[in-house]
Every structure is written in structure tokens, then in C-alpha cells.
């Protein structure tokens, strides 16, 4: 550190000395590159004697050009910033508008409520008045009758008393006749002495519940979710099967990437086809910050799937969505599972794998017999179509060859092994579906050892089964150790090497099943894998592994030491979109099936790209296993087309 301090001190001194002492007097004509400073002639011979100094004029142009480049670079950012400013301003303005609209809505709603309250009050009072006046009428009528009766009695009384006290005998007789009848009637008369009405008239208004309702009346809806951090996940984002429901989950997040836990965000999704047709989507708000988008596509092809949150695209939107007919759906079950399980390619992989290429109707080809190449590409013949019979396949995966001119295939979804001659004639089929030793559940990889025994990697049974050349079960190995073996190969020492796709690990066994060694783990470093699929052995007895989600091919020695790798993600020469099958020819050339790009590439023994196999006339669809026939051709399992093909190459 002392040296460092010294250097720094010296450098700053040099930079400043000339500036302090000479600059006012001398012309700065020179430039010291190590000190990045201008200086005068004297100083080039002084402190900067040992430094490279050049005339200032020379570096000036250079520096001007550099500055100009930088200027252009930052100036180029201006349009982006202008656009961003416009956008944020627009959102700010919309926010104010929305607020004002909401205020108006609140005022209107409450005014209406007040009006309704007032109306109800008036109605209640009116009813009250009406009831009261009806009751009063009854009571008044009763009163009138009673008063009338009382007055009649009183007047009869006073008249009769008058006659009794002061009347002449004639008058009394007269009165007795007249008043006697009248008083008799009054005595018998039934007056309405019981009240004809009651005074019951109350008003009861139950306000407790209403008051509570009013206190909670109205909620404000908003979230802090923004498009650029929110994510859409799910198989349905990239792949769909025509006529089947597909879903995508959107998880909303705020600017700091925190999950938003409330719903009601304005989410829109649109799927548009190449011809401009728009497919309807259904959005379900889970009310916890996640949303489900459901849709069903009616035709196959490439679609653009845009997901907008508050008008802004969520991360990665618009997505490229590919819809296929049911039988064209991706064929590698472990890949499908992986995609579903780890959206965004979380497993060290490079995101979603998309498949290219078209499927031709298989009716174009004969079923079990070989077909000569109708157009001149490098195809020699093709065998197979989808089915369960001899020479028919369902998602065939592994392929291997024997020195005596046989091609053996792992017919994965038919749980069987099929054998053909080098010229494509069917020879043998064996295998029974099941989970017991000797049965097959999902055969994916296949290899033939020096004795002609057939070794089958069974992905779902999690072991390797060994069969005699005529299909008799002999032994199983690796049970209890393997988690999902996909590809298998046999090396020059008779060791059995398998790529365990699930464990991201390569296992090396003796032929009796004893473990020699294993290497690899999940990851992206040299001795790690992001989904190893197939293995091959080169002429130096080295192990060549395709790393599906790392889009590369990795080469190790027999002890598992890393030697080199090649390939990266892409569509260019020597790039991969999920490599699968691999084989090495007699010259050490490495031939690789490029699953997602649906092509086969040829590399030299050091991994330099040499060429493609020309498959244009009859395109591949998701090629898997690959092997070299004893007569020097490439045999490939064309899984998506449910056939195998044999090609010439490097000719
Ligand atoms: C597909 O979705 C529609 C509406 O979203 C629903 O009515 C239908 O039942 C669904 N079909 C299946 C097979 O799930
Ligand atoms: C949100 O709700 C959905 C549907 O009820 C549920 O499946 C999901 O797990 C919930 N997500 C969270 C993060 O709570
Ligand atoms: C592949 O084969 C087709 C058919 O013969 C031919 O038209 C095409 O040019 C070939 N492509 C290349 C790259 O050689
Ligand atoms: C592939 O592995 C390399 C290191 O071997 C790593 O740098 C790269 O990120 C990986 N790529 C992917 C797509 O996983």
C-alpha cells in the first residue's frame, strides 16, 4: 500500500505542478498519457521524463472524437427520457382526472342520498298527518253525538223541572204527556260512551344499522401495482393447444418489486393472431393481487399475447404464443413439466423453450415402409407415423445403433423398444408397460453394449433396464440412485453412462450396476447442469453431454473432469435452443440435435461449427435422440413427427 500511496501522490503532484507553476507563463503544448494532463515543454523533460508524452494537438482530435461519441451516446438517451416524461406526466394527469371524477361521483351519490332521505321524511310526516286526521274524524263524530245527547238531556231536565216547580195543573198534565215519552226515550237511548278510537300514533326509525352503513359507505379502490415489475406466468403464456382452455397467472407488484396483496387492478389481456383476429380472454380477480387469464384459441399458429396492467405492459409483454393441434403438443414430458413448474426458467435454464418448424400431415408418407426422398435434401429415408403398431411410434425419444447394422429405438409413449435394419426394415418389437423389473414405464434413452445387449434408460421407473439382443430382460441397474435418467451411452471400457435429467447429474456404472462415479449438480457452472438430456462417448473415451436449459454441449473426461463446452442460446450457427440428442462419428465430429430450432448441427471434435444437415424438404419437429448407423449415416428420432429419419451428412 505504501507503493500505491506513493504512486498516487506522485501522479497528483505531476498533474498539479505544471498547472500551478508553469501554466500561467508557458503554453501547454504537450500531453502526458499516464497522468492524463496537459503540460509545457519543460515539464516533459522534468517530472514526466519517464512518461509517454505526445503533442497536445495530436491527442486533442482523439479526445474530441471520444467526447463526441460520448455526447452522441448521451444525446441518444434524450428521446427515451422525453417519452418517459410524457408517460409519467400523462399518468399524473390521468390520476388527477380520476380523482376529480371520483369526487364528482361521491358528491352526486351523496346528494341523491340526501334527496332520498328528505323524500322519506316528507312521506312519513304526510302519512302521520293522514292517519291522525282519520282518527280525529272518528273521535270528533263521537264527541258530536255525545254532546248532542248531553244537551238534549239537560234541556229536557230544565224544561220538566220548570213545569214541576212553577207550572199550573193544566201545564203539568200537558208536560207529563209530552215530556214523559221524550225522557223515556232519552233514558233508553244508547249513547256512544266507549271511545271509538285510540291515541296510538308513534314513529319508530331504526337508525343503528343505517348509521353503521353510512359510516362504512363507499370504499376507495387503488393499488400500487405497476406493469414493469408485475409478472405473468404459466404454460399458457407461450403454448396453447387448439380448442383447449389455457390459463396464465398474473402476479401484481409495486415499483419496489413487492407483492401487491389487494385486487381490483385494471388488467387487460389481448391475444391477436397473424390475420388480426382477436381472441376473447376471461380475467378472474383472485382479490389477493393475483389474477387468472383464461382463453381458448380456435386455430393454430403464432399469436401475440399482450397483458396490460393500467395500460402498461407487464414484464415481457407482448409474449409470442404458439398454438398447436393436440397431436403437435411438445413431446418431451420432462420439458413440459419443467416449464410448468419453473416459469421464467428459474431452474438455471434460459427461460422458455419455443419450438420452431412445421408439422406435415403424416398422410403424405407411407406408414411402415421407407420412403425415398421426394425432394433432394440430405434425407435418405423416413420410417414411421403415429400409432401403436410395428413401425409406428408415439413420442419416440432415444435411438442407438449396433455394429451389425441395426437401429434400436425407445418408443417412449408406447412403452416399447423397436429394432430396424440400417435400410429401415422392421425387425423386432419388445417391451411391456409397467413398474416391475423388466417392464417399461417411460423409456427415453437407449444404448447397445459390446455384447449387443440393449440398455434402456427408463425415466419414470428411475432405473436402467438391460435386455438381450432378442429382447429378454436380464437385469436392472441404478434403482434407488437415479431420479430421472434420460440418455444413456456405453464407453470403451464397457461402463454405462447415463444423464440423470432430474438430478442434473451424470452417473457412471459398471455393467453389473456398481457405481464407478458420478458428477454434476443443478446449476450453470462447468461441472453443473441445467437439465442434461443425452450423452455420447467420443473416440478419446470422453463424455459429451447436452445441457438442455444451458443451451450448450459439455465435454468431460472419464473421471468427470470438465474439459470444454460449446454453444449458447440462439438461432445462429453453433447456437442452440435446447440441445437434445448427440453422437460422435469416427473422425470425432460431434453431431447435435437442436430441439427448439428443429435442426441438426455438425461440429468438429473441438466444438467448432461445421455445418447443418439439410432437412428443409421434410422439416424436423422437436428432434430427440441421435446416433450414427454402421454405414455412416445419421439416424434421428423426429419425436414431434413420430418417426425416425436417416440422413447423409458432410458430403
Ligand atoms: C373452458 O372455459 C370455459 C369458460 O372459461 C368453461 O365454461 C369451460 O367449462 C372450460 N372447459 C374446460 C374443459 O375446462
Ligand atoms: C390468491 O388466491 C388464489 C385463488 O384463491 C390462490 O390460488 C392463490 O394461492 C392466492 N395467492 C396468494 C399469494 O395468496
Ligand atoms: C437444402 O436442400 C434443398 C433441396 O434440395 C435446397 O433447395 C436447399 O438449397 C438446400 N439448402 C442448403 C442450405 O444447402
Ligand atoms: C450456461 O452456463 C454458463 C457457464 O457455464 C453460464 O455463464 C450461462 O449463464 C449459462 N446459460 C444459461 C442460459 O443457463
Image (tube, rainbow, N blue to C red):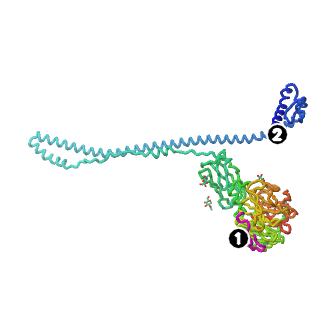
* 414 relative to 238, above or below: below
Is 357 positioned to the left or the right of 121 in the image?
Answer: right
Q: Residue furthest left?
A: 169
Residue under the point 47% across and 45% down: 210
* Residue sticking out furthest to the top: 25
- Residue 81, image x, y percentages: 73, 40
| 96 or 557: nearer the viewer | 557
Among numbered discs 2 and 1, the one appearing first in the sequence: 2
Which range of residues does the magenta coloring cover?
466-481
The C terminus is located in which quarter? bottom right
Residue 72 position in % (x across, y down)? 80, 39
> Neighbour class for label 2 at 10 Å: few (<14), some, many (≥20)?
few
* Residue 122 falls within the magenta-colored stretch: no
Q: Is mark 1 within 8 Å of ligand 4?
A: no
Who is closer to the viewer here, 501 or 377? 501
Q: Residues within 10 Å of mark 1 (few under 14, many from 20)?
A: some
Whether residue 288 can be seen here: yes
Q: Which residue is mark 2?
A: 69
Q: Which mark is residue 437?
A: 1
Pinpoint residue 513: horizontal percent, then vertical percent. Answer: 75, 67
Amino acid at each position: 500500500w505504501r507503493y500505491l500511496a506513493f504512486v498516487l501522490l506522485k501522479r497528483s503532484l505531476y498533474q498539479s505542478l505544471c498547472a500551478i507553476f508553469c501554466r500561467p507563463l508557458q503554453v501547454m503544448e504537450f500531453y502526458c498519457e499516464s497522468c492524463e494532463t496537459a503540460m509545457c515543454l519543460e515539464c516533459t523533460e522534468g517530472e514526466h521524463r519517464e512518461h509517454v508524452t505526445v503533442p497536445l494537438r495530436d491527442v486533442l482530435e482523439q479526445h474530441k472524437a471520444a467526447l463526441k461519441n460520448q455526447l452522441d451516446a448521451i444525446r441518444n438517451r434524450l428521446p427515451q427520457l422525453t417519452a418517459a416524461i410524457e408517460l409519467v406526466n400523462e399518468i399524473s394527469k390521468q390520476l388527477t382526472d380520476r380523482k376529480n371524477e371520483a369526487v364528482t361521483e361521491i358528491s352526486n351519490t351523496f346528494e341523491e342520498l340526501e334527496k332520498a332521505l328528505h323524500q322519506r321524511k316528507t312521506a312519513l310526516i304526510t302519512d302521520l298527518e293522514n292517519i291522525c286526521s282519520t282518527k280525529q274524524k272518528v273521535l270528533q263524530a263521537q264527541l258530536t253525538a255525545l254532546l248532542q245527547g248531553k244537551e238534549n238531556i239537560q234541556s229536557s231536565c230544565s224544561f220538566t223541572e220548570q213545569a214541576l216547580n212553577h207550572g199550573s195543573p193544566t201545564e203539568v198534565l200537558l208536560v207529563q204527556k209530552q215530556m214523559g215519552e221524550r225522557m223515556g226515550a232519552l233514558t233508553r237511548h244508547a249513547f256512544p260512551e266507549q271511545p271509538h278510537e285510540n291515541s296510538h300514533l308513534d314513529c319508530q326509525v331504526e337508525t343503528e344499522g343505517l348509521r353503521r352503513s353510512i359510516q362504512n359507505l363507499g370504499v376507495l379502490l387503488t393499488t400500487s401495482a405497476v406493469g414493469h415489475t408485475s409478472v405473468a406466468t404459466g404454460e399458457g403464456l407461450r403454448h396453447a393447444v387448439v380448442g383447449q382452455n389455457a390459463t396464465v397467472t398474473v402476479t401484481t407488484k409495486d415499483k419496489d418489486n413487492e407483492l401487491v396483496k389487494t385486487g381490483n387492478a385494471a388488467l387487460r389481456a389481448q391475444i391477436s393472431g397473424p390475420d388480426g383476429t382477436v381472441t376473447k380472454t376471461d380475467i378472474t380477480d383472485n382479490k389477493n393481487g393475483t389474477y387468472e387469464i383464461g382463453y381458448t384459441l380456435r386455430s393454430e399458429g403464432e399469436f401475440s399475447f399482450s397483458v396490460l396492467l393500467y395500460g402498461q405492459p407487464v414484464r415481457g409483454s407482448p409474449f409470442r404464443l404458439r398454438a398447436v393441434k393436440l397431436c403437435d403438443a411438445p413431446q418431451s414430458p420432462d420439458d413440459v413439466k419443467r416449464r410448468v413448474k419453473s416459469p421464467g426458467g428459474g431452474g438455471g435454464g434460459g427461460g422458455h423453450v419455443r419450438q420452431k418448424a412445421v408439422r406435415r400431415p403424416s398422410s403424405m408418407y407411407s406408414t411402415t415402409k421407407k420412403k425415398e426422398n421426394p425432394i433432394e435434401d440430405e434425407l435418405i429415408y423416413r420410417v414411421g407415423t403415429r400409432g401403436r403398431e410395428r413401425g409406428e411410434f408415439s413420442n419416440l425419444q432415444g435411438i442407438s445403433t449396433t455394429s451389425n447394422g441395426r437401429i434400436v429405438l425407445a418408443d417412449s409413449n408406447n412403452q416399447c423398444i423397436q429394432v430396424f435394419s440400417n435400410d429401415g426394415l422392421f425387425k423386432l418389437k419388445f417391451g411391456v408397460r409397467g413398474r416391475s423389473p423388466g417392464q417399461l414405464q417411460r423409456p427415453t434413452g437407449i444404448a447397445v453394449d459390446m455384447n449387443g445387449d440393449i440398455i434402456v434408460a427408463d425415466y419414470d421407473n428411475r432405473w436402467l433396464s438391460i435386455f438381450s439382443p432378442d429382447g429378454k430382460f436380464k437385469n436392472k441397474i441404478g434403482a434407488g440412485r437415479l431420479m430421472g435418467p434420460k440418455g444413456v451411452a456405453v464407453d470403451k471400457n464397457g461402463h454405462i453412462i447415463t444423464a440423470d435429467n432430474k438430478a442434473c447429474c451424470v452417473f457412471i456404472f459398471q455393467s453389473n450396476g456398481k457405481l464407478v462415479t458420478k458428477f454434476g449438480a443443478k446449476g450453470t457452472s462447468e461441472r453443473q447442469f441445467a437439465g442434461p438430456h443425452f450423452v455420447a462417448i467420443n473416440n478419446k473415451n470422453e463424455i459429451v453431454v447436452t445441457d438442455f436449459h444451458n443451451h450448450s454441449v459439455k465435454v468431460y473426461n472419464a473421471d468427470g473432469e470438465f474439459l470444454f463446452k460449446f454453444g449458447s442460446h440462439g438461432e445462429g450457427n453453433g447456437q442452440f435452443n435446447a440441445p437434445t440428442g448427440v453422437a460422435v462419428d469416427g473422425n470425432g465430429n460431434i453431431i447435435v440435435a437442436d430441439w427448439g430450432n428443429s435442426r441438426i448441427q455438425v461440429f468438429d471434435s473441438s466444438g467448432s461449427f461445421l455445418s447443418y444437415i439439410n432437412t428443409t424438404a421434410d422439416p424436423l419437429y422437436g428432434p430427440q435422440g441421435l446416433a450414427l448407423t454402421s454405414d455412416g449415416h445419421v439416424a434421428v428420432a423426429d419425436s414431434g413427427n413420430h418417426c425416425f429419419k436417416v440422413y447423409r451428412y458432410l458430403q
